[in-house]
Image: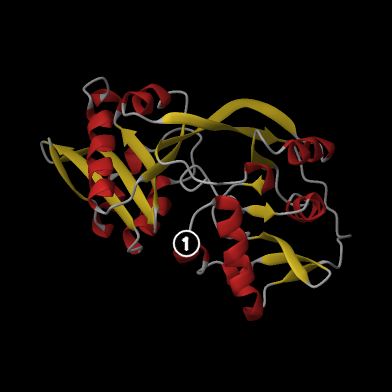
Amino acid sequence: MQYDKLTYSEIDKIGYLQPEGWPDITDVFRFYCSCDFCNPIKITIDSKIVGIGCSIFFDKTAWLAHIIVNPEFRKRGIGYKIVDYLLNDIKKRGIETSLLIATELGEPLYLKSGFRLVSNYRYFKRNSSKIDNQFTSKIQPYKAGFYSDIIKLDKYISGENRENLLKGYLIKSFVHINNNVIDGFYIPDLGEGPIFAITIDAGKELMRFKYSTIDKATLPDENQAGIEFIKELGFIETNTIGKRMILGSDIEWKPEMIYSRIGGNFG
């Protein structure tokens, strides 16, 4: 069994590890391999990639993501060893907080590694979009002058410094402005399209805007206003639950202000 960094040229070899119902992992690992704040790794046995995973670094926090093991090689401790390898690398970088979102299959593994449950993400879907072209004028497309306010708002709500991740996607983002203050934003091209807002009105209006064309939604359990509104938009809750977990120091995040997450790899 050998641990190595996964390279861009090897991505075509991991497609067979694709979990059912997940977004294309080859696209995600192309992103990981092209970012200097990501550390994608592979586990090989007899020259075959049998497991993969990635750690992502945001200043004082790190995320573990896409830890996947070939079903034929499960129950050999490979998943645990991937987690341990990534956590040791995170520790060497002086980062004291590690986060992840676990599936039901993965939760026991992460509990064994010392993670504790922080929150649950709830998943919703509907059969078809209800096209609505009537949106508040408070929603405005991105301008360069909005950059610092969006970064500050994200840091306030997420409790993390994710500027390196966000900056490449802001050009196509939208903000909600009330009394000349940005109180919410929506970034369509980043993962599932995060919506972060410090007011319920901004959160709902950005949700109305986003879900005029999109039929899947994921929100943290603490955002009851968002959950009630997504149901008003015709969504039905599924049986899927994502478990947000943490290892190390807690962070001051505000889940009640998250009206749509980025994804299972970033929260």
Give me the residue at 59% from left, 56% from top. Answer: 156
Please give the residue where the numbered disc 1 appears in the rendered image: 165
- How is colour applied across the structure in the image? secondary structure
- Choose between 97 and 53: the one closer to the eye: 97
Residue 143's place in the image compared with 202, above or below, is: below
Which quadrant holds the N terminus?
top left
Residue 165: give x, y in percent of width and height.
47, 62
Indicate left or right for 141 with 234 as reference.
left
Q: Would residue 158 appear left or right of 199 to someone viewing this image?
A: left
Where residue 206 appears, as percent x and y from the top left, is 76, 55
**Taking 142 as reference, is 105 above or below it?**
above
Q: Position of residue 196 (x, y in %)?
A: 66, 54
Residue visible at 63% across and 42% down in the picture: 255
Would residue 247 be found to the left or right of residue 224 on screen?
Answer: left
Q: Residue sitting at 48 percent across and 48 percent down? A: 266
Which quadrant would residue 8 be assigned to in this image?
bottom left
Q: Secondary structure at mark 1?
A: helix
Which of the 4 image quarters holds residue 155?
bottom right
Residue lying at 59% horizontally and 73% vertically, measured from the top left: 148
Q: Is residue 111 above or below residue 15?
A: above
Count of numbered circles on the image: 1
Give whichever of 82, 215 is nearer the camera: 82
Q: Residues within 10 Å of mark 1 (few under 14, many from 20)?
A: some
Residue at the outermost right position? 134
Left or right? Give the position of 99 relative to 258.
Answer: left
Among the 4 quarters of the image, the one containing residue 123 = top right
* Residue situated in front as seen by the camera: 84 or 253: 253
Three-letter code, disc 1: Leu
Q: Position of residue 118 (x, y in %)?
A: 52, 32
